[in-house]
Amino acid sequence: MIFCNAKLNLYLKILGKRDDGYHQLNMINVPVSFYDEMNIDIYPGDSKLVQNFRPELSCSYDKTTIYKAYMLLKTFIPENITIEVSVKKIIPEGAGMGGGSSNAAFFINELVKRFNIKLTEELISKIAFQVGADVPFFIYNKPAFLEGIGERVFPYRAFPTLNLLVIKPDFSVNTKWAYSLVKCYSQPDDFNKDIMTQKELLTIMTNDLEKPVEEKYFEIKKIKNFLYNNDALKAMMTGSGSSVFGIFKSCNDLDRAYLKAEKTFLNYKVIKAKTIGA
């Protein structure tokens, strides 16, 4: 069993728009202890990829991140080999938690290991970037500062373990639409990109997408207010949403807020997690 963890954005600054239409970003991403479950079986066959998802995905199987990763690695895989991938999807779709990107990255790393593919971490990361902008982060899978559109990943040497409550509402936010709302760009901040303390992190956390998104989706602000009213040290939307998370001082504070959230947001996904990989 391979456990493909989710991620959260703790910091997202949009610095400008590139000629290719993508936005130039500075981000802090962290892997968190909430997982999809993946099995990979390899056996003699017809040189193909078989994919099984529970529940079924909303996209066709030739559009999945796993399929894209397979096609990029196919030349490194012996002929007449069938790879069967089964994924139990627990990370919600459209949550801003990187479920599809995580699946692709763990799939890439597993094939590199099983077939003893001789590639440097840098080359693996470049392959991952061709699958999607978030995938290189999951190749490293450590708290990290990111630049570009997410392809330049700089893992932190030290990062705090955070107690997290994540609430995913019963709607998703279109990422392209969210970025289209941003008309004014930020300046990069100067802070330590090697060692991060919780105290410093709480002072710098921000998300340039949060305010314009919550102007349409008032539920985002409602969730943030709930988290602050239940002792969160900081509450913020992750990425373009729709998930919102809170950081809590202690496990007891987290547990109390979790129980209240389950009763308050009956149709929402409520998740307890911690940062991992630090």
Image: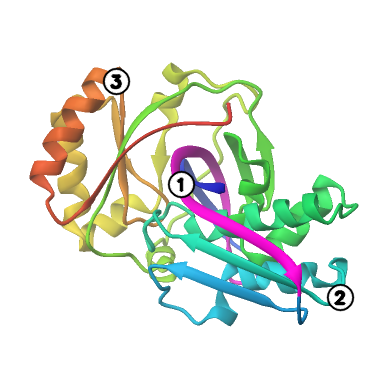
Give the percent coordinates (x, y) of residue 162.
Answer: 41, 25
Badge 1 marks a residue whose secondary structure is strand
Q: Which residue is mark 2?
A: 79
Crowd around label 1: few <14 · some 14–19 · many ≥20 (10 Å): some
Nearer mark to the viewer, of 1 and 2: 2
Our reading of the magenta stretch's main secondary structure is strand
Q: Is residue 181 visible?
A: yes
Colouring mode (rainbow / by chain / secondary structure / one colour): rainbow
Query: What numbered label is drawn on residue 54?
Result: none
In this view, which residue lies farthest toward the right? 118
Q: Which residues are magenta?
A: 21-44
Q: Is residue 218 left or right of residue 94?
A: left
Residue under the image location 44 percent in, 30 percent down? 204
If you read the primary sequence from the N terminus, does the residue marked by circle 1 or circle 2 appear first?
1
Q: Residue furthest left?
A: 263
Q: Residue at x 40, y 39 (%)?
A: 206
Snapshot quadrant of residue 189: top right
**Would you say residue 85 sits in the magenta stretch?**
no
Q: Position of residue 88 (x, y in %)?
A: 45, 59
Other-residue count near label 3 (Cα within 10 Å), few / some / many at <14 / 14–19 / ≥20: some
Q: CA distance from mark 3 to mark 1?
A: 20 Å
Q: Nearer the viewer, mark 3 or mark 1?
A: 1
In the image shown, does 243 or 262 lie closer to the viewer? Answer: 262
Q: Which residue is mark 3?
A: 251
Q: Amino acid at mark 1?
A: Tyr
**Residue beneath disc 1:** 35
